[in-house]
């Protein structure tokens, strides 16, 4: 029976057609959340009394990265939500100048305080997913406020501390010689030129999103990723159920993710896709996350 479920989820993912990523699932609620750094664009779907799931996008991403997962969680009775990070897409007006006192950069504390404020806005513990850079944010939030977490999913998150890009395929050897701005420029060039070969609808949305996202926020995030904190031992010590979910063609080699999962005591799920299983393997990802939830 388990094999049938796996095959069904994979078949559903492989049948996903190109779509308009700006079109949210029916019933999705749009709102603004007043975070420490400013107003964050926020969406939610599902019964208000459902167990809460918070999905956090990464650098150059947005809440729309999870639109294929939203209706799946809502249909299962969960209350699922996401928001744009400060400086990103529709949260472009949120930034360090809004802090008290104002600061000059999008630093780790800014993003972490925003995430903790979002988690504190709801009752009880939430199932939290951090995607790519936001995986590190979610790790730090769990260690600071374990009372807010029912489970932790790390989606394509940096698997090594320090200069996180040193293990990235192809560009790893030169990553130590680039500045945050140069690293951001390289990443943005690859996305704009569709090196990942995403469908036309996805590419159009991504390029449109760049028009709003503040470049300095991307530069600062890349700089933070070049100094990823080492919290592996502390993560391993927390009893919160954890999942490391990645594509077999992710930026980082599979063996690094496997080692990371072992080091922090997490389950590992690997899909036949790249850096964005939330877009290309949503049924499989939701399936594995709900198994994790059951353990919680």
Image (cartoon, helix red, strand yellow):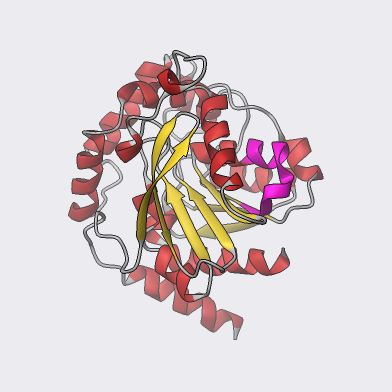
Q: Is residue 32 left or right of residue 290?
A: left
Observer-nearest residue: 192 or 140?
140
Q: Nearer the viewer, residue 263 or 51?
A: 51
Q: Main secondary structure of the magenta part?
A: helix
Residue drawn at 68 percent across, 69 percent down: 294
Q: Position of residue 93 (x, y in %)?
A: 33, 29
Quarter of the image holding residue 84? top left
Q: Position of residue 102 (x, y in %)?
A: 47, 15
Across and down, in percent, residue 155 comes to 53, 49
Instruction: Decide which of 81, 241 is in the foreground and name it.
Output: 81
What residue is rendered at 39% in x and 21% in y? 219
Query: Which residue occupies 25% across, 43% down?
Result: 206
Q: Is residue 253 left or right of residue 212?
A: right
Residue plotted at (49% across, 41% down): 132
159 w.r.t. 96: above or below: below
Q: Is 146 included in the stretch rendered in magenta?
A: yes
- Which region is colored magenta? 139-152
Q: Was residue 85 drawn as part of the magenta stretch in this picture? A: no
């Amino acid at each position: 029976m388990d094999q049938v479920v796996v095959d069904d989820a994979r078949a559903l993912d492989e049948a996903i057609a190109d779509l308009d990523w700006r079109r949210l699932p029916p019933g999705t609620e749009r709102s603004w959340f007043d975070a420490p750094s400013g107003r964050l664009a926020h969406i939610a779907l599902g019964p208000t009394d459902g167990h809460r799931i918070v999905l956090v996008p990464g650098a150059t991403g947005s809440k729309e990265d999870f639109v294929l997962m939203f209706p799946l969680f809502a249909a299962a009775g969960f209350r699922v939500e996401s928001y744009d990070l400060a400086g990103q897409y529709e949260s472009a007006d949120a930034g360090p100048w809004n802090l008290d006192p104002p600061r000059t950069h999008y630093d780790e504390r800014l993003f972490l305080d925003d995430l903790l404020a979002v988690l504190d806005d709801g009752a009880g513990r939430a199932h939290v997913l951090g995607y790519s850079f936001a995986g590190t944010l979610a790790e730090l939030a769990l260690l600071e406020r374990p009372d807010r977490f029912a489970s932790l999913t790390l989606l394509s998150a940096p698997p090594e501390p320090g200069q996180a890009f040193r293990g990235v395929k192809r560009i790893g050897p030169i990553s130590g010689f680039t500045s945050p701005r140069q690293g951001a420029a390289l990443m943005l060039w690859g996305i704009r030129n569709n090196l990942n070969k995403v469908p036309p609808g996805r590419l159009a949305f991504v390029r449109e999103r760049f028009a709003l996202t503040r470049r300095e926020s991307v530069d600062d995030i890349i700089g933070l990723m070049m100094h990823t904190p080492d919290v592996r031992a502390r993560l391993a010590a927390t009893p919160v159920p954890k999942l490391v979910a990645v594509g077999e063609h992710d930026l980082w080699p599979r063996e690094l993710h496997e080692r990371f999962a072992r080091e922090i005591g997490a389950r590992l799920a690997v899909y036949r896709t790249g850096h964005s299983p939330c877009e290309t393997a949503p049924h499989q990802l939701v399936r594995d996350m709900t198994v994790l939830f059951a353990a919680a």
